[in-house]
Every structure is written in structure tokens, then in C-alpha cells.
Amino acid sequence: MRQREFEITIGPDGSVEVHVNGYKGKSCLEAVKLFEQIVGSVQEQRLTSEYYDPEEPVRNRIEQRSD
Amino acid sequence: MSCVCILTPVVIAAWPAFSAAVMAAASSLGYTLVEATQEAEEFALESKTVNRVDLEVPQSEVVLDTLHRDQRISVSREGVTVTFGRDARGKASLCVSGEGCTEAELRARGEELSRRFVQKYVYQRLMEEMRSRQFVVVEEETCDNHAIRLKVRHWES
């Protein structure tokens, strides 16, 4: 299980700043999209060094059934 | 932290969510709900001592259903009455009136309440969405500048 964390600040004027934690690579952009759907349009976006880290590996488990 | 984004809110609300946000904003600023009568509104329109300012909430849309058509909410504090409603273009609008107040004072009061309304709307919408996605709010605080800070966690397999 991977922990994801968002630090959200809703300003006195309703503008929203979201710090996205726990994602590596471009997957954090999916989180940004989620907040875009909920709140409104993205006015500014800053990428941090973690964004340029390798993407998280996708782990699949394949089971073979005999029936 | 992998990225930071700043979002400009868009208010698209049906009447129940709209009125809930109005009431949350109004009560946080010390306003109380008042019954806006037709006579009082006509008096405000015709009176020479009662000033009136009309404002609109930017980037807003109030979605009406047949049950809540033409509905409005009025709140009042220290002789200033603010009526929230929906204008002809469907935007959220405010009418601010008060006896003996200048237009600048009324505008300032209306803008303060309008900003707080947008903040409360965004807060309610975020909380509702976080709950529906089973995200957990682990911290919540209101800062001195009235900003609301939330820390939200969830786990992905």
C-alpha cells in the first residue's frame, strides 16, 4: 500500500493550493487532474524534483488456474 | 512532495449546496438569516436613504431545479442586508443594501461575504469529494488570515 498525501490550503478568497506528496514521476499529474475536476481551473503548477524521479513500477501478479 | 498546484475556484452549485455555503459564510461573519419581504425590498428600491449595490460572484453558475426557482436568501448584520440569488444569466448574485451606508461600504461588505461564500463552497465540495473517495482528513485548522488548511491521506494498493 502506498500512502498519498495532500496538503490543501483554501485561501480566504476561495483559491486553493495543493501540495501533492507521495507520488513519483508523472503520476502526480493525475492527482492534479482530480483537484481540477473538484475545484476549478489550474492557475499555476510547480513540479518538484520528485516529479523527475523514475515512475513507480507497476506490479502485476499473474496466477494460472488449472480449471 | 512531487508537485504544487494553485487552482482558481469555479462555483457550479445546485440550490441546496449554494444555500448551505451562503449560510456557512454568513454565520462565520456574524450575519443572521432574515426573511426578505416584498415590501422591504420595494422600500429599499424606492428609498433615498437606503443605498444598494449589486455584485456577482465571478465564475459561478447556480443550477436551478423546478422546486427552487426564484429562491433567494437574505442575511443581515448591523443594518446591512445581503440577498443572494441567481441573476438572469444564471450567475450567483448579491444585492447589498443598507440605510446610511455609502456605496463603497456596501461594496466592501458584499465582496467580503462573496469571498467567504466561495471559500465555504470550495470547502464543502472538497470535503464531500474526499469522503466519497474514502480519503481521510487527518488535520484541519483555520489560520489567522481565515485560510483553511487540510491534510488529507489515502492509500493505494
Image (spheres, rainbow, N blue to C red):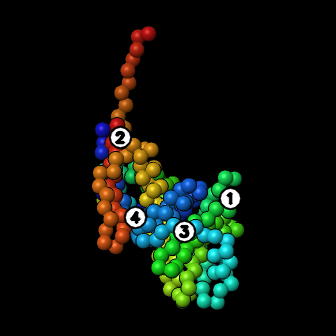
Q: Amino acid at mark 3?
A: Val
Image coordinates for residue B105, horizontal then vertical, percent = 50, 86
Query: B91 above or below A62?
Result: below
Mark 4 vs mark 2: in front: 4
Image coordinates for residue B136, horizontal then vertical, percent = 34, 47
Crowdedness near tag 2: few (<14), some (14–19) or many (≥20) residues, C-alpha within 10 Å = few
Residue at 65%, 56% in the rendered image: B68
Disc 4: which residue: A10
Mark 2 vs mark 1: in front: 1
Chain containing the residue with disc 2: B
How far is disc 4 from disc 2 in space, using C-alphas? 25 Å
Q: Residue B156: give its label.
A: 2
Q: Residue B34: give its label.
A: 3
Q: Amino acid at mark 2?
A: Glu
How far is disc 3 from disc 1 in space, using C-alphas? 19 Å
Chain containing the residue with disc 4: A
Same chain shared by disc 4 and disc 1: no
Residue at 42%, 53% in the rendered image: B127
Q: Residue B69: give its label.
A: 1
